[in-house]
Amino acid sequence: PGPDCLFVVRNGILYGFKGSLTSALGILTGNIVYLSLVYFGFASLGKIPLFMFITSLFGGCYLLYLTVMSLKESSELKIDFSEENQKTFNQKTLFFKAILLNLSNPKAILFFSSVLTPFLKGNLLLSLLFLYAGISGAFLTAALFSTRLSLIKTQRGILKAANKIIAGLFLLFSVKLFLQAMEAAEGLVKQFH
């Protein structure tokens, strides 16, 4: 799973179904942006080195921020899983964090612009709608699955470990994006020589 899926699962574990659903809806909103770019013919953005450099660098920084925040939460983890507490997280903030995570992921840009586009034939709008339905189903399944991890909810030690593992995965993704930004920067340098 990529950072989007991990974000949905993490927030489902921490905040329950509302948290995971809010995260999934934010990610899916970001996907609407990508699908709109494909539909209106801007799929080639993912092939521009400057664009890839900026999104890779920004995405790496944002994932590094999520890593630090997850590790900070792990050290201070005092979570009350009552229904009342699960309502207290800020849905709007979580929603926009999910959109930002999704839109700063250059792998998603590449997927929608390079990998996916050649497979869309015939009625483009219908193809994109079916694709979106499939992606939505996958993220909603992740949202439901994450809220069913009751063992993690009741065991504070397991919850802290899961949060640290997710933070480690975010860190690996951020390093990968920084390396991708360096690769894109090399492509930029070659363009100007």
Image (spheres, grey):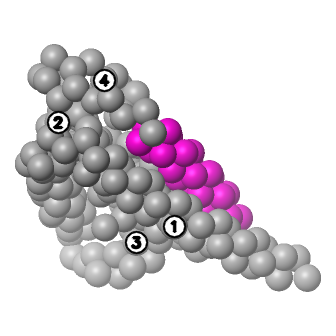
Of the image marks 2 and 3, the number of the one nearer the N terminus: 2
Mark 3 and mark 1 residues within 8 Å of each other at the beta carbon: no
Q: Give the magenta part as a residue range.
A: 48-74
Q: How would you rate the neighbour count of disc 3 (Cα within 10 Å): few for under 14, some for 14-19, many for 20 or more?
A: some
Of the image marks 3 and 4, the number of the one nearer the N terminus: 4
State how far apart marks 2 and 3 are (Cα): 29 Å
Of the image marks 4 and 2, the number of the one nearer the N terminus: 2
Q: What x and y, as percent, mark residue 69?
A: 50, 40
State how far apart marks 3 and 1 are (Cα): 19 Å
Q: Is residue 159 above or below residue 183?
A: above
| Badge 4 amino acid | Phe
Nearer to the camera, 145 or 38: 145
Of the image marks 4 and 1, the number of the one nearer the N terminus: 4
Q: What x and y, as percent, mark residue 121?
A: 25, 78
Residue at 65% over, 66% down: 178
Residue at 14% over, 40% down: 154
Pointer 2: what residue?
16
Relative to 57, 85 lies left or right = left
Mark 3 and mark 4 residues within 8 Å of each other at the beta carbon: no
